[in-house]
Every structure is written in C-alpha cells, then in structure tokens.
Amino acid sequence: MHGLPLVFSLYVLSVVTPYVSAYTWPSPQYDTLEGMLYEGRRSDGSSLAALVHPCRKRSGTLASVPAEWLRFAFHDMATHNADDGSGGLDGSLAYELGRPENFNLGLNQTLSDFEAYPNKYISRADIIAIGAVFAVSTCGGPTIPFRGGRIDTWQAGGTGTPEPQHDLSTLTESFRKQGFNQAEMIKLVACGHTMGGVSSADFPQLVAPDPKSSFPVFDDFDTTPSFDEKVVTEYLDGSTQNVLVVGANKTLVSDLRVFQSDNNATVQGLTDKSVFQSECKTMLGRMLEVVPKGITFTDEITLLPAKVTAAQLTFEKDQMVFKTNFRLTQPINQTANANRNVTLFWCDKNGDNKNCAGGKTNSALPVKKLSDDPNVSPITLNMGLYFINYNYIVPIDTAASITKFWFQVDENDGSKPTTYDNGGNGYVIDQDQVLFVPMLSHVDLVQNTTSDAQTYTNRVGDGFTRNYKLVVAVRDGTNPSRVYADATDVAIQGFAFPLQTQIDFTPDSSIPSQSGYSFYSGKVASAGVQLTLDVHAEAAGQKYTQDFMETQELDNTPYVKPGPVSVTTTTKSSAGRMAVPNALAAAALLVFGAAVVRL
Ligand code: HEM
Ligand SMILES: *[C@@H]1O[C@H](CO)[C@@H](O)[C@H](O)[C@H]1NC(C)=O
Ligand SMILES: *[C@@H]1O[C@H](CO)[C@@H](O)[C@H](O)[C@H]1NC(C)=O
Ligand SMILES: *[C@@H]1O[C@H](CO)[C@@H](O)[C@H](O)[C@H]1NC(C)=O
Ligand SMILES: *[C@@H]1O[C@H](CO)[C@@H](O)[C@H](O)[C@H]1NC(C)=O
Ligand SMILES: *[C@@H]1O[C@H](CO)[C@@H](O)[C@H](O)[C@H]1NC(C)=O
Ligand SMILES: CC(=O)N[C@H]1CO[C@H](CO)[C@@H](O)[C@@H]1O
C-alpha cells in the first residue's frame, strides 16, 4: 500500500499528518472525545467552544473567559499530593469553591459553563482539561496535546492551592506536591499569568474597584489578552503593570517572589516567542495530566480525517430507517469539489443477499450536505481545517435488515474513487434485536423552582427536571426476559451527583407492533441536560445492546424522509468482499481502504 503516493497526496492525507494508531470504529470514548475536541460541541450542536472562542471576554464585562478556564484547570489540579497520589484534575474543584483559596467569581462562572458537557464518555475532569486546551489555543497559544480518561470525584478533596500571600517556601512546597520543581513552578506561573489578571472583586487591596461600574475591574498581568511571552518580557524590562509584581502590598506580590526565586534565570529563558510557546505547551500539557493515581489515559486524541460521527438503526413514521453521518475534512479556503459524490453502501443482514453474498449492494446519496464553520473549534481552526458532513437517512426493510456499511468518495474528476470501509471490515451494525426509538419518545420539562437563583452569563445548565418517556423496539422472536437501559446523566447543574440508574421497559400496547417489531416503554426523570441510554435486551443467555443513545433532541428533530435507495449488482467474484459496482475498482479500493485508515 505504500506504492500509492499519488493517492496519499490526492486526499486529506497530505494535509492531516497525525498517525491514527489502530483506530477502528466504533471506539465510543475516542469518538466522543474527538468530537468534543475538534468539533467543540456535543452531538446536538450545543457548543462548548463557542463560550470561549474567539478569545472572548465574558459578555458585557472585562473578564476573560479563557483566563478563567485556564485558572480553573490549575486550581482543580493544584491539590494533587504527589506523596500519596491523591487529588489532581478530577473535578473536585466544583465542591471547593467556597474555600478562600478558590474565592473568585470566574471559577464559579466556569463551573456553570462546563456543567452541560460531561457525559458517560467525557468526564467532568476531561471537560476541564479540554476547556484549558481551547482557552490557550483560541488566544494564540500552542495546541496542547490532549488525552482523555480522567475520572471524576464527586466530593471536595485536599487543600494546598497557592495563594499570593504565601511565602516562597510554601509556594515551592505546594508545587513540589503537585509534581513540579522550582524551575517548572516558574514556567507554569508565567504560562498561566499571560492571560487575564487580578480582579477588584477578589483583591480590592491590589485593584481599586470602579465605583461607576457594576462589574469588577481587572488589572491584567500583561498588555495583551493573547497567550504570549509579554508577561515575561514586560517583567524583565521593568514596564510590567502586573500587580502580583508591582502591587503596593509586598505580602501579595507572589509573581515577583516566584520569578526572581532563581535570580530570574528561568524567566530569562522564556523571552523568545517560540521558546515560550513550546515550554508552555510542555508544562501545561503536564499540568493537565496531573491526576489521582490509578488513572489510565486514552491515546492522544488526534483528528480523524474521515469519521462516522453517527450511526443509528431505528424506526421513524412506521418505517425502519438507518441514519448515519460521514464527516470529511477540508482545508480552509479550499472549497470541496461540487461534483464530489459521497455514496453510502450497505449489505443486508438476512436472506438471499445476506452480507451482499448474492451480489447485490444497496447504496444511497446523502439527504443533506453541511459545511461547518471553521470556528467550531479553535483546535481545528488552527490546523487550517474545517468539516463537511454528509448526512444519510435510508429506509431498511426489516426482513433484510442491515449488517454493515461503508462509504465511497468519487471526485468525478478522473481520479479513482476512495473507499472508507473501517480498515476492510466495513462499519458493522452488530445487532437489530433492541433499538431505541427517539421519534416515539418524549420529554417534558418541569421548572425546578427550588433551583438556586444565581445567574451567570454563558449559562447553559438550566434548573429544569426532565421527565422522559422512552420507547424501544424489540425484534419479534427475541423473546427477551428483560428489556432495560442503563441511564446516565452527568450534565447536572452545580455538578450535583450524576444520575446513574436502570430503567425497565415493558411492552407498550398503545404502540401497534409492525414489520416484525414490538414496542416497549419506560420512564425516567433527570435534573441534567444530557441523558444517555445503553439499551439492553436479555434473552436466552444473550445480551443485545445499543450503546450511548442520546436524548437531547427528543421532540426537537424534524422528520426527514429517507432518501432513495439504489441496488447495484456485482459480479460474483467481488461480491461479499467489497461489493462495489465493478470488480476492478473493488480490487483497487480494497488497498486504498486499508491505506487510508492507517495513514
Ligand atoms: C504561585 C502560584 C500562583 C499564585 C499565587 C496565583 C495567584 C493568582 C491570583 C491572586 C490571581 C488573581 C485572581 C483574582 O483576581 O481573583 C490569579 C489569576 C490567574 N491565575 Fe494564578 N496564581 C498562581 C499560579 C497560576 C498557574 C500555575 C496558573 C495556570 C497555569 C494560573 C492561572 C491564572 C490565570 C489564567 C489567572 C487570571 C484569571 C482571570 O483573569 O480571571 N495561576 N492567580
Ligand atoms: C462560588 O460558589 C461557592 C459555592 O456555592 C460560594 O460559596 C461562593 O460564595 C461563590 N463565589 C462567588 C464569588 O460567587
Ligand atoms: C529580576 O528582574 C526584575 C525585573 O527586571 C528585577 O527588578 C529584579 O531585581 C531581578 N532580580 C534578580 C535577583 O536579579
Ligand atoms: C497586605 O496584605 C496582607 C494579606 O492580605 C494583609 O494581611 C496585610 O494587612 C496587608 N498589608 C497592608 C500594609 O495593607
Ligand atoms: C483564508 O482566506 C482569508 C481571506 O483571504 C485569509 O485571511 C486567511 O488567512 C486564509 N486562511 C488560511 C488557513 O489560509
Ligand atoms: C431542584 O434543584 C435543587 C437545587 O439545585 C436540587 O437540590 C433538587 O434536587 C432539584 N429537584 C429536582 C426535582 O430536580
Ligand atoms: C453531487 C452529487 O451527488 N452528484 C451525483 C452523484 O451521483 C449521482 C448518480 O449516481 C448523480 O445523480 C448526482 O448528481
């Protein structure tokens, strides 16, 4: 496959360099983390990145959102104790905001920014880390490599976060416990104190409030809002206005105490723009990986140049449908070829043409094509890329059903089409015994009047209780002994304890059975905004599962009619193997498919 350099340069491979090690679909945790990092949003479109990007001030105020988010990650991490492995980036800060060391409105606002985004596959601590990665990137800083897998705690942890009145030995000891030596402490403080500043609301003894304004005054650490070396160069050339250096109360000038603790040697090494960026990339990357002992990180989450971002077999308006979305990557300022054909192919699961063995392949074109704004995530923007989504809804005959699918991209410009088939196996639909049916499910919102009355700008969490009535379809003949779902909702206002419960589903005679399926329903209530379900049917020692079904769009998704289906007949020799319209292309594409996934 390395004999095909032309193919490599023709496609996204020349643009996107990361080595996607052994990725196969589905990898739900990887897929979910990748989506949050590179699309900046939940799958229903609710955008985390838009709260901070582009290098935003909190609306109507002088407060820097990225500065608040970076500081939040530091304060969550700072209670790590290297001596016993406790603490670190684990979300415990949510329960420590009343402490003097964390007294700051920005931290409270940040908690509120984050609460709608964690779910079964993205911990709150991973959201805090992604928030810091966005914050640095959107203000011109480096792209900090991100790995997921942090595990949340749901209670307060130890103390020990540095405060400006601490003497040098207290500060040095605090950083030692976090896992950093003196030089690393200096670098971390410089990398942290290049955005934002000190607020009159929290330190009136350092920053005088403006009596004419209802918002706090901020004395910024340096003269630019961006992530740059100015904090260091202005300190060294004596022009700095950083009150943690030049403040009148010498007890509180912790930046001066830290920066000159080695006679300025470390800060003198940070004055070069590119050195500052690369040192901060390393140090902040390490900071985000300070976690309680026993945590295994995922691989580094790199961008998937071609990704199946959704795939669901379900019922809509008395019809079984398969819905999927295929996401391709495009360099910014380069429009995708308008003649490009992106075709979905799939094989039957049952009958004469099982697994395309009868030589017949089903195919369909997208019902919708959607180009994303490059601003969806500062990370993707900084890579010079944006996404194009090809959206498919196809009718499925329940007798034939569907076993696997794949995509072919034909530029219609004389070049050979490219097949994306998950490394040769296709994208497999592993069961059709139990299927979540969003179109028959509902949610009622009930205002929670006891919800705390604090209002923040950027608020996403909302103080409603959601009462769900959920419906699943069970294939006749399954004869389940139990139909149930594991329900999870981590996205709860105030980072309250997550909902983790089981819902039992019972046959629902109000929904007529059809096409070989019967319907079951169940109920659950959640105070969160991101309920997900792992739907199960247990039958004769077998357990069928549809993992991570999302509910945010219940009652909200307009019905879209399935698109037309074509059936192509393949020659016997290639059938079942690749099942593309002709055998020659099939042989070539098999090689392409493997090459594309391995990069
Ligand atoms: C010696 C250690 C540190 C001390 C004593 C310290 C102290 C402070 C103080 C007093 C403020 C002003 C807060 C307010 O007005 O409420 C502040 C702000 C900030 N700190 Fe630190 N800090 C330290 C290290 C760090 C580190 C390591 C980072 C991140 C890597 C960091 C990130 C920030 C950021 C981004 C802000 C600005 C927040 C905003 O504008 O809302 N700090 N820090
Ligand atoms: C932040 O939230 C904590 C816990 O609810 C509260 O004690 C504290 O007063 C709040 N801080 C600010 C500045 O609003
Ligand atoms: C470190 O640099 C600052 C700013 O130039 C200066 O005021 C201070 O005296 C220096 N300290 C040492 C120990 O060199
Ligand atoms: C300086 O700040 C410290 C800590 O907040 C405080 O205890 C002290 O009284 C202040 N000193 C002066 C002279 O204001
Ligand atoms: C895209 O084009 C705009 C306007 O011509 C330009 O400002 C921007 O830098 C370009 N971006 C890239 C990634 O080439
Ligand atoms: C309503 O909100 C309060 C405070 O946030 C919370 O403790 C309580 O559990 C909520 N009640 C319901 C029914 O969600
Ligand atoms: C953009 C696009 O989808 N173009 C063509 C793809 O292929 C079919 C035929 O299979 C054409 O009808 C489309 O116009």
Image: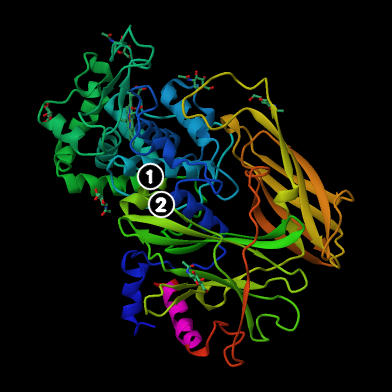
Report the predominant secondary structure element of the magenta stretch. helix
Does residue 322 appear in the picture of this structure? yes
The residue to which callout 1 is attached is 133
On screen, 426 above or below 525? below
Question: Viewed as shown, does residue 448 lie left or right of 385?
Answer: right
Which residues, given as a range, are shown in magenta? 585-596
Q: Could you tell me which residue is drawn at 18 percent across and 42 percent down?
A: 270
Proximity of marks 1 and 2: CB atoms separated by less than 8 Å: yes
Residue 593 is covered by the magenta coloring: yes
**Sequence-first disc among 1 and 2:** 1
Number of residues whose C-alpha sits closer than 10 Å to that of mark 1, classed few (under 14), some (14–19) or many (20 or more): many
Please state which amino acid type lies under the numbered disc 2: Phe
The residue to which callout 2 is attached is 146
Per the image, label 1 sits on a secondary structure element best described as: helix
On screen, 264 above or below 121? above
| Number of the label disc, if any, that sits on residue 548 | none
